[in-house]
């Protein structure tokens, strides 16, 4: 992934910077309806990322809807692939969107 810098601010999360300086926070989530709103609000307040991407890893609750409502780009997996599969999807999204 030429031109991409990755930092991991927490277990399972990644922040990627593209060649153009665009920062994306990747947040894999599985059934996190109870906490995703607070995480997204704190990240939006405390961070200089340009885009927050939540990868809904097959949740059966309202995780994806809540992420959408809080302005995150939400990628939905039809079933649980685990954190590795979710992060891979997020990285593919980051590469495809510069």
Image: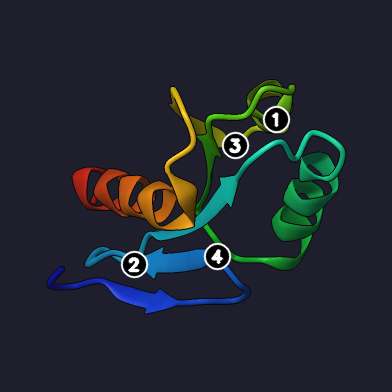
- Quick one: label 4 or label 3, which is nearer the N terminus? 4
Q: How far is the residue under mark 3 from the one under mark 1?
A: 11 Å
Mark 2 neighbour density, 10 Å: few (under 14) some (14–19) many (20 or more): some
- Between 21 and 79, the residue placed more toward the observer is 79
Point out the frontmost of discs 4 and 3.
4
Q: Which residue is mark 2?
A: 21
Q: Secondary structure at mark 1?
A: helix
- Quick one: label 1 or label 2, which is nearer the N terminus? 2
Q: How far is the residue under mark 1 from the one under mark 4?
A: 16 Å
Q: Which residue is mark 1?
A: 63
Residue 17 position (above or below residue 24): below
Dividing the picture into quadrants, the one containing residue 30 is: top right
Q: Which residue sits furthest left?
A: 2
Q: Which residue is mark 3?
A: 72
Q: Residue at x 39, y 66 (%)?
A: 16
Mark 3 in CB contact with mark 1 (< 8 angstroms): no
Q: Residue at x 40, y 55 (%)?
A: 87
Point out the frontmost of discs 3 and 1.
1
Q: Secondary structure at mark 3?
A: loop
- Quick one: label 2 or label 4, which is nearer the N terminus? 4
Mark 4 neighbour density, 10 Å: few (under 14) some (14–19) many (20 or more): some
Dividing the picture into quadrants, the one containing residue 77 is: top left
- Between 77 and 36, the residue placed more toward the observer is 77
From the viewer's perspective, is 78 left or right of 63?
left
Point out the frontmost of discs 2 and 4.
4
Q: How far is the residue under mark 2 from the one under mark 4?
A: 22 Å
Mark 4 in CB contact with mark 3 (< 8 angstroms): no
Mark 1 in CB contact with mark 2 (< 8 angstroms): no
Q: Which residue is mark 4?
A: 12
Q: Secondary structure at mark 2?
A: loop
């Amino acid at each position: 992934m030429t031109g991409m810098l990755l930092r991991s601010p927490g277990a399972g999360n990644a922040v990627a910077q593209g060649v153009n300086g665009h920062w994306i926070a990747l947040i894999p989530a599985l059934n996190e309806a109870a906490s995703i709103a607070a995480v997204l609000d704190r990240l939006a307040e405390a961070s200089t990322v340009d885009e927050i991407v939540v990868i809904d890893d097959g949740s059966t609750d309202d995780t994806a809807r809540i992420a959408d409502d809080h302005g995150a780009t939400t990628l939905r997996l039809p079933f649980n692939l685990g954190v590795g599969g979710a992060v891979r999807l997020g990285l593919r999204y980051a590469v495809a969107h510069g």
